[in-house]
Image: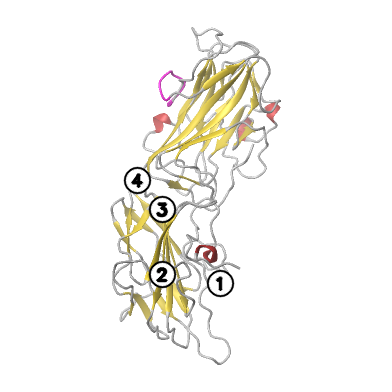
Amino acid sequence: MRSARRTRGLGLLAGVAALTWTAAGPAVADGEQDGRGSAPATGLQASSHLQLAKPVPVSGVKPGDDVPLKLLVRNSGDGPADRTTLYIGGSQGLAFVEKYSNCVHEDVPAQDEGPAQVTASCSIEQVLEPGVVYGPEEPIVMKLQPRALYDWYTLHVDADSPVFPNGSPNGSGRQLRLVAQNNPPAGVEFLDSLPFTHVTAENTADFSLTGAKIKAEKGETVSAEVTFTNKGPAWVDNDAGSPIGVFDVGIPAGTTVTGAPDFCTPIGSGGKTVAEKDAEAYRCTTPYDYVDENTTLSRAFELHIDTVVPNATGKVGFVRGEHRSGTLPFDPVPGNNTAAIVVNASGTGGTSGGNASAGEGGSGSEGATSGATASGGGSAGSTGGGTAAGASVSGGGTQPELAESGVGAGPLIAAAAGLLGTGGVALAVTGTPWRSRRRPSAAESAGITG
């Protein structure tokens, strides 16, 4: 079983930033510094030193709105910059309103561990004088897309650096030019580092869970599938660096988990990680700290029927995660945040086989259908899973901010490295792929190798 990788949710380099042309480092939060930027003068030779104004987060906007980028550049050196290269990157909920004729614009697909992005590398052939603050001749505007929610943009400038490593300018609009600001805003802090700016849109993403309904005889091993879906309309990025979707899966009474899927780890009282044999439930996560809209992730558990217990139920529900805005604050439909695995519901007896239909919103028979198959005899996958005996309903309790969700009462134990493996049970993904999240360095994205 693989564990979820914890990465920062919003400090993405976006394929454009942090470029001093020979090295790149991790992105930083709004207004922090990491020591990059155009180098100040050294020795007696006059040199330019370009800095960017500290970013200001954007909120109170909605899909379809235009967002002007807050770009101010100051030459803090003692010599002119004869040419400026401006790098602009945006998350996948943003799009350029105008593509400039002196820029290379790219729609960068998701790659490795990073979501899709939009970028522009622009050559501004004009002199920036020392001590002067410059801004765009016309505002640089990005439009919020229908999928926008927790988005961002990032900026970086270089003086007299190589231009267009990714190809020739391909914009059909005006030239992007900078003009001196006669009355620059007072109190603005200029930084050497790469700023990035949160753009928080008023939008929603419907996270839902679906369980399974199983009929099986004693001694059989069955597959119970739990599904997580982001029904959109927004994609969701988690700036806390941990998985954006975290949910617990209870073990039905009279069953033993003989195979658990990737990104699910056995937990006990208070949500603490335990050995498989001591598990009361499993804590499952999304693989990375973002999820695209219209995406479904399936987790298949192998259950051995130790004893036939009528209506044996394992509760499925979201638990508190780590997010700057709380637990699923974007979800408008809390009713589908819980589900259940139900084994041998009343009236079904011990007939083997069967299909799952215990779906969204609890342990009833309504909701999406997910697979549940039975096989006679021995177990599949890894062995030694937790056994739930006694009560027919496994799990219980609620999570703050998310009533009737989850199967345990403890805080989230971060689903990071060190989760215990339980064997090769398939993890099925449909819809938009669950892309990996490695963020390319600026040099990689700009086409610099070696």
Q: Are marks 1 and 2 in contact (CB under 8 Å)?
A: no
Left or right of residue 307: residue 59: left
Does the residue at mark 3 contact the one at mark 4 (Cβ under 8 Å)? no
Instruction: Work out how far the residue at label 2 is from the one at label 4, CA to CA, in angstroms.
Output: 36 Å
Residue type (three-letter) at the residue carrying disc 3 = Gln
Q: Main secondary structure of the magenta part?
A: loop
Query: Mark 3 falls on what kind of element?
Result: loop
Q: Residues within 10 Å of mark 2 (few under 14, many from 20)?
A: few
Q: Identify which residue is drawn at 41% across, 69% down.
A: 168
Which circle, 3 or 2, is nearer the viewer? 2
Q: Magenta stretch: residue 364 in it? A: yes
Secondary structure at badge 4 equals loop
Residue beneath disc 2: 168
Q: Tell me the residue that label 3 is attached to.
A: 92
Cα separation, mark 1 vs mark 4, equals 35 Å
Stretch in magenta: 360-368
**Above or below 332: residue 349:** above
Q: Earlier in the sequence, mark 3 or mark 2?
A: 3
